[in-house]
Image: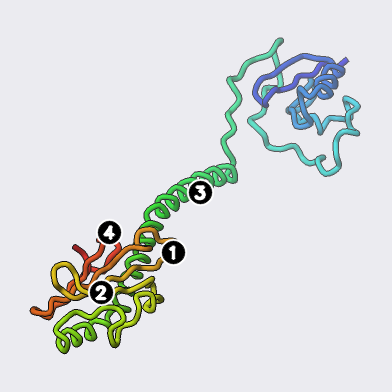
Amino acid sequence: MSEWYYAEGNRQRHGPLPADAIVELYRSGRIALDTLVWREGMPQWQPLAEVADAFGLAQFVPVAEAVDAPAGPPPLPASVPGGPVAAGPPPRQGLSGCAIAAIVAAIVGVLLLGVVGVLAAIAVPTYNQYLQRSKTAATVAAMAPLKPEVADFHARQGRCPINGDTGFGRAESYAGAGLRSVRVGRFDNGHCGLEAILAAPGHDGIDGKALWLDYDPEAEVWTCSSEIDDKLLPRDCRG
Protein backbone atom coordinates (compact mmCIF):
# COMPACT_ATOMS: atom_id res chain seq x y z
CA MET A 1 0.00 0.00 0.00
CA SER A 2 1.34 3.48 -0.92
CA GLU A 3 2.25 5.80 1.87
CA TRP A 4 1.26 9.45 1.43
CA TYR A 5 2.42 12.74 2.85
CA TYR A 6 0.48 16.00 2.95
CA ALA A 7 1.60 19.56 3.59
CA GLU A 8 -0.53 21.46 6.11
CA GLY A 9 -0.73 25.11 5.16
CA ASN A 10 1.68 24.28 2.32
CA ARG A 11 4.48 24.52 4.89
CA GLN A 12 4.36 21.68 7.46
CA ARG A 13 4.62 18.10 6.23
CA HIS A 14 2.76 15.17 7.77
CA GLY A 15 3.08 11.45 7.04
CA PRO A 16 3.57 8.85 5.96
CA LEU A 17 -0.14 7.94 5.98
CA PRO A 18 -2.20 5.35 4.09
CA ALA A 19 -4.58 6.56 1.39
CA ASP A 20 -7.56 5.82 3.65
CA ALA A 21 -6.21 8.26 6.22
CA ILE A 22 -5.88 10.96 3.58
CA VAL A 23 -9.52 10.36 2.54
CA GLU A 24 -10.66 10.59 6.16
CA LEU A 25 -8.74 13.86 6.61
CA TYR A 26 -10.50 15.26 3.52
CA ARG A 27 -13.95 14.10 4.64
CA SER A 28 -13.44 15.62 8.10
CA GLY A 29 -12.41 18.95 6.59
CA ARG A 30 -8.84 18.84 7.89
CA ILE A 31 -7.52 19.08 4.34
CA ALA A 32 -9.03 20.34 1.09
CA LEU A 33 -8.72 19.70 -2.63
CA ASP A 34 -5.93 22.27 -2.86
CA THR A 35 -3.84 20.60 -0.11
CA LEU A 36 -0.47 19.43 -1.48
CA VAL A 37 0.18 15.65 -1.29
CA TRP A 38 3.10 13.42 -2.32
CA ARG A 39 4.19 9.79 -2.39
CA GLU A 40 7.25 7.99 -3.62
CA GLY A 41 7.37 7.90 -7.40
CA MET A 42 5.79 11.37 -7.85
CA PRO A 43 8.19 13.93 -9.34
CA GLN A 44 6.75 16.77 -7.20
CA TRP A 45 4.00 17.70 -4.78
CA GLN A 46 0.50 17.94 -6.29
CA PRO A 47 -2.84 19.37 -5.09
CA LEU A 48 -5.14 16.63 -3.84
CA ALA A 49 -7.56 17.47 -6.67
CA GLU A 50 -4.93 16.42 -9.24
CA VAL A 51 -4.58 12.91 -7.78
CA ALA A 52 -8.19 12.50 -6.57
CA ASP A 53 -8.55 9.26 -8.59
CA ALA A 54 -5.95 7.60 -6.36
CA PHE A 55 -8.21 8.16 -3.35
CA GLY A 56 -11.58 7.60 -4.99
CA LEU A 57 -12.39 11.30 -4.59
CA ALA A 58 -12.79 12.20 -8.26
CA GLN A 59 -16.52 12.78 -7.80
CA PHE A 60 -15.73 15.65 -5.40
CA VAL A 61 -13.68 17.56 -7.95
CA PRO A 62 -15.91 19.99 -9.94
CA VAL A 63 -15.05 20.16 -13.61
CA ALA A 64 -14.52 23.91 -13.32
CA GLU A 65 -11.95 23.38 -10.56
CA ALA A 66 -9.94 20.64 -12.32
CA VAL A 67 -7.24 23.05 -13.48
CA ASP A 68 -3.49 22.90 -13.68
CA ALA A 69 -1.68 22.81 -10.38
CA PRO A 70 -1.00 26.31 -9.08
CA ALA A 71 2.55 27.50 -8.74
CA GLY A 72 2.11 27.56 -4.94
CA PRO A 73 5.07 27.83 -2.58
CA PRO A 74 8.53 26.44 -3.40
CA PRO A 75 8.30 22.61 -3.83
CA LEU A 76 8.82 20.56 -0.71
CA PRO A 77 11.68 17.99 -0.79
CA ALA A 78 10.75 14.74 -2.51
CA SER A 79 12.49 12.68 0.13
CA VAL A 80 10.79 13.08 3.48
CA PRO A 81 12.36 11.70 6.64
CA GLY A 82 10.01 10.08 9.12
CA GLY A 83 7.66 12.27 11.07
CA PRO A 84 6.46 15.82 10.45
CA VAL A 85 9.02 18.53 9.88
CA ALA A 86 8.20 22.08 10.97
CA ALA A 87 9.11 24.70 8.41
CA GLY A 88 8.12 27.73 10.48
CA PRO A 89 4.69 29.26 10.89
CA PRO A 90 2.63 29.79 7.73
CA PRO A 91 2.72 33.33 6.36
CA ARG A 92 -0.01 35.57 7.70
CA GLN A 93 -2.56 36.59 5.16
CA GLY A 94 -2.89 40.36 4.86
CA LEU A 95 -6.11 42.24 4.22
CA SER A 96 -7.23 42.29 0.64
CA GLY A 97 -7.37 45.58 -1.26
CA CYS A 98 -11.17 45.57 -1.05
CA ALA A 99 -11.12 45.04 2.72
CA ILE A 100 -8.63 47.88 3.21
CA ALA A 101 -10.71 50.16 1.01
CA ALA A 102 -13.84 49.31 3.00
CA ILE A 103 -12.10 50.04 6.32
CA VAL A 104 -10.73 53.34 5.01
CA ALA A 105 -14.16 54.29 3.67
CA ALA A 106 -15.76 53.50 7.03
CA ILE A 107 -13.20 55.59 8.92
CA VAL A 108 -13.60 58.49 6.49
CA GLY A 109 -17.38 58.21 6.83
CA VAL A 110 -17.19 58.41 10.62
CA LEU A 111 -14.84 61.41 10.43
CA LEU A 112 -17.11 63.16 7.93
CA LEU A 113 -20.13 62.59 10.14
CA GLY A 114 -18.24 64.10 13.04
CA VAL A 115 -17.20 67.13 10.96
CA VAL A 116 -20.75 67.59 9.65
CA GLY A 117 -22.10 67.36 13.20
CA VAL A 118 -19.66 70.03 14.43
CA LEU A 119 -20.44 72.30 11.48
CA ALA A 120 -24.17 71.87 12.05
CA ALA A 121 -23.76 72.70 15.74
CA ILE A 122 -22.04 75.94 14.72
CA ALA A 123 -24.06 76.81 11.64
CA VAL A 124 -27.61 76.30 12.92
CA PRO A 125 -27.43 78.76 15.86
CA THR A 126 -25.57 81.27 13.67
CA TYR A 127 -28.22 81.01 10.97
CA ASN A 128 -31.03 81.43 13.53
CA GLN A 129 -29.36 84.59 14.85
CA TYR A 130 -29.09 85.88 11.29
CA LEU A 131 -32.82 85.27 10.71
CA GLN A 132 -33.83 87.07 13.91
CA ARG A 133 -31.49 89.99 13.21
CA SER A 134 -33.03 90.26 9.73
CA LYS A 135 -36.53 90.38 11.25
CA THR A 136 -35.63 93.15 13.69
CA ALA A 137 -34.03 95.11 10.87
CA ALA A 138 -37.23 94.68 8.83
CA THR A 139 -39.25 95.96 11.82
CA VAL A 140 -37.14 99.11 12.04
CA ALA A 141 -37.61 99.62 8.30
CA ALA A 142 -41.41 99.16 8.64
CA MET A 143 -41.51 101.89 11.31
CA ALA A 144 -39.44 104.32 9.27
CA PRO A 145 -42.42 106.02 7.50
CA LEU A 146 -43.81 107.05 10.90
CA LYS A 147 -40.68 108.97 11.89
CA PRO A 148 -41.20 112.07 9.69
CA GLU A 149 -44.89 112.09 10.63
CA VAL A 150 -44.01 112.18 14.35
CA ALA A 151 -41.48 114.96 13.79
CA ASP A 152 -43.89 116.98 11.63
CA PHE A 153 -46.74 116.60 14.15
CA HIS A 154 -44.53 117.83 16.99
CA ALA A 155 -43.36 120.78 14.91
CA ARG A 156 -46.95 121.82 14.16
CA GLN A 157 -48.67 120.93 17.44
CA GLY A 158 -45.87 121.46 19.95
CA ARG A 159 -46.53 118.08 21.52
CA CYS A 160 -45.94 114.41 20.83
CA PRO A 161 -48.63 112.60 18.84
CA ILE A 162 -50.47 109.61 20.28
CA ASN A 163 -52.43 106.75 18.74
CA GLY A 164 -55.75 108.13 17.47
CA ASP A 165 -54.41 111.57 16.54
CA THR A 166 -54.85 112.63 12.94
CA GLY A 167 -52.56 110.52 10.78
CA PHE A 168 -51.95 107.90 13.49
CA GLY A 169 -54.04 104.74 13.85
CA ARG A 170 -54.64 102.43 16.77
CA ALA A 171 -51.60 100.49 18.02
CA GLU A 172 -52.94 97.21 16.60
CA SER A 173 -53.62 98.77 13.18
CA TYR A 174 -49.89 98.60 12.46
CA ALA A 175 -49.80 94.81 12.88
CA GLY A 176 -48.05 93.01 10.03
CA ALA A 177 -44.56 92.90 8.51
CA GLY A 178 -43.19 91.41 11.74
CA LEU A 179 -45.13 93.83 13.96
CA ARG A 180 -47.76 93.01 16.55
CA SER A 181 -48.46 96.64 17.43
CA VAL A 182 -46.95 100.15 17.40
CA ARG A 183 -47.67 102.64 20.16
CA VAL A 184 -47.17 106.33 19.43
CA GLY A 185 -46.62 108.69 22.36
CA ARG A 186 -44.32 110.47 24.78
CA PHE A 187 -41.51 108.78 26.68
CA ASP A 188 -40.67 109.51 30.33
CA ASN A 189 -37.66 111.57 29.23
CA GLY A 190 -39.99 113.97 27.40
CA HIS A 191 -39.06 112.72 23.97
CA CYS A 192 -41.60 111.59 21.42
CA GLY A 193 -41.36 108.11 20.12
CA LEU A 194 -42.59 104.77 18.87
CA GLU A 195 -42.80 101.49 20.75
CA ALA A 196 -43.07 98.43 18.52
CA ILE A 197 -43.89 94.92 19.74
CA LEU A 198 -42.44 92.31 17.39
CA ALA A 199 -44.34 89.31 16.04
CA ALA A 200 -41.97 86.45 15.22
CA PRO A 201 -43.48 83.07 16.19
CA GLY A 202 -40.83 80.41 16.70
CA HIS A 203 -38.12 82.98 17.47
CA ASP A 204 -38.20 83.34 21.24
CA GLY A 205 -35.35 85.83 21.22
CA ILE A 206 -37.49 88.51 19.56
CA ASP A 207 -41.13 87.40 19.57
CA GLY A 208 -43.23 89.68 21.81
CA LYS A 209 -40.20 91.86 22.63
CA ALA A 210 -40.23 95.68 22.45
CA LEU A 211 -38.17 97.94 20.19
CA TRP A 212 -38.16 101.72 20.69
CA LEU A 213 -37.48 104.65 18.35
CA ASP A 214 -36.85 107.75 20.49
CA TYR A 215 -37.16 111.24 18.93
CA ASP A 216 -35.44 114.23 20.53
CA PRO A 217 -37.31 117.28 19.15
CA GLU A 218 -34.62 119.76 20.20
CA ALA A 219 -31.76 117.87 18.52
CA GLU A 220 -34.08 116.43 15.86
CA VAL A 221 -32.31 113.10 16.35
CA TRP A 222 -33.78 109.58 16.40
CA THR A 223 -32.31 106.86 18.63
CA CYS A 224 -33.07 103.15 18.39
CA SER A 225 -33.00 100.84 21.43
CA SER A 226 -34.59 97.57 22.50
CA GLU A 227 -34.96 94.95 25.22
CA ILE A 228 -33.75 92.39 22.67
CA ASP A 229 -30.22 90.99 22.91
CA ASP A 230 -27.75 93.12 20.92
CA LYS A 231 -26.67 90.16 18.76
CA LEU A 232 -30.21 89.98 17.35
CA LEU A 233 -30.45 93.69 16.57
CA PRO A 234 -29.28 95.77 13.60
CA ARG A 235 -26.09 97.65 14.42
CA ASP A 236 -27.72 101.09 14.89
CA CYS A 237 -30.11 99.71 17.57
CA ARG A 238 -27.51 98.14 19.83
CA GLY A 239 -26.97 99.56 23.30
Label 2's element? strand
Identified by mark 1, the residue type is: Pro
Q: Position of residue 29 (x, y in %)?
A: 79, 24
**What amino acid is at disc 2?**
Leu
Q: Which mark is residue 109?
A: 3
Residue found at the far top of this picture? 82
- The residue indicated by pointer 1 is 201
Mark nearer the N terminus (1 vs 3): 3
Query: Nearer the observer, disc 3 or disc 4?
Result: 4
Picture coordinates of residue 84 (x, y %)? 68, 13
Quick one: which residue is furthest to the bottom in this view? 156
- Residues under labels 4 and 1: Cα distance? 17 Å
In this view of the protein, which residue sits in the foreground, 29 or 65? Answer: 29
**Element carrying mark 3:** helix
The reply to whether dot 1 and dot 3 touch (C-beta < 8 Å) is no
The residues tagged by marks 2 and 4 sit, at their Cα atoms, a distance apart of: 19 Å
How far is disc 1 from disc 3 in space, using C-alphas? 37 Å
Amino acid on which disc 3 is placed: Gly
On the image, numbered disc 4 is attached to which residue?
Answer: 229
Residue nearer the viewer, 18 or 32: 32
Q: Earlier in the sequence, mark 3 or mark 2?
A: 3
Label 3 and label 4: CA atoms lie apart by 39 Å
Q: Which mark is residue 59?
A: none
- Relative to 211, does residue 103 appear above or below in the rendering? above
